[in-house]
Image: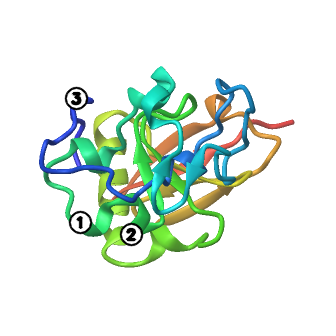
Amino acid sequence: MKWVEAVPDPAKTCGSCAMCCKLFDVDWLEKPKPAGKWCHHCQPGRGCKIWQQLPKKCGDYYCIWRIDPELAAEWRPDQARFILTHAHQDAPLAVLIDPTMPDAHRREPYWSILRKTARQHLEGRGSTLVTFCGTKRSLIFPDGEVPISDSVVLSDITIERRESVDGPHWSPVFPKH
C-alpha cells in the first residue's frame, strides 16, 4: 500500500459495501452514532436511504480500497471486514475493524501486508498503523501487534527503534502515569 490522493479509482465503486456507515464514529448527523454501530440511515448491503441528500462529509469520504488501484477486490471493506483509511483524526493510517470480526485484519493475505506496510511507515515516517475495533486500539508492528490501554492518548506514544543483528526492531513507549 502506498499513500495516494483521495481521488477514487473509476474502476472501483462502493456497490453494496457500506462498512464506513458502521465503522466510523459519526457525529455530524442529526442522530450521532458510535463506531461499530450501523448508521440509522444505512441499509446494510444496500447503502444509504438518504443518498439523494447525502451529508457532505459522507459523500466526500473514500476508503483506501476505493482510491488505491493496486488493492485487490479482497481488500474491499465488506469483504475484508475492516476499512483502511487516512481519514482518522488520531492516526496517519488506520485500520477500522468490524467488532463482529475482531481478528479480520489478522487473516491472510491481510496480516502479512499490514505488517509490511507498518515496516514501510516506520522506516519512512517513524509512525505505524493503528487499529480501532470498537473501543479497543492497538499498534501494528512488523513483528506483531501491541494493544493500547484505554487510558493512553495516541499522541503520547513514542516509538523506539533499536538495531539488532536481524535488522531494526521497533517498540512503543507508553507514557508513565
Q: Residue at the location (74% across, 51% down)? A: 135
Provide the secondary structure element on which disc 1 rests: helix
Q: Residue at the location (68% across, 45% down)? A: 40
Q: For this view, does 52 lie left or right of residue 117?
A: right
Q: Residue furthest bottom?
A: 108
**Dot label at residue 73:** 1
Residue marked by disc 2: 79
Q: State whether residue 165 appears in this view.
A: no
Q: Residues within 10 Å of mark 2 (few under 14, many from 20)?
A: few
Residue marked by disc 3: 5
Tag 2: amino acid: Gln
Q: Mark 2 touching mark 1, by CB under 8 A?
A: yes
- Give the quarter of the image for residue 33: top right
Tell me how far mark 3 sits from mark 1, CA to CA.
Answer: 19 Å
Provide the secondary structure element on which disc 3 rests: loop
Q: Give coordinates of residue 12: x percent, y percent.
A: 20, 51
Q: Nearer the viewer, mark 2 or mark 3?
A: 2
Tag 3: amino acid: Glu
Tag 1: amino acid: Ala
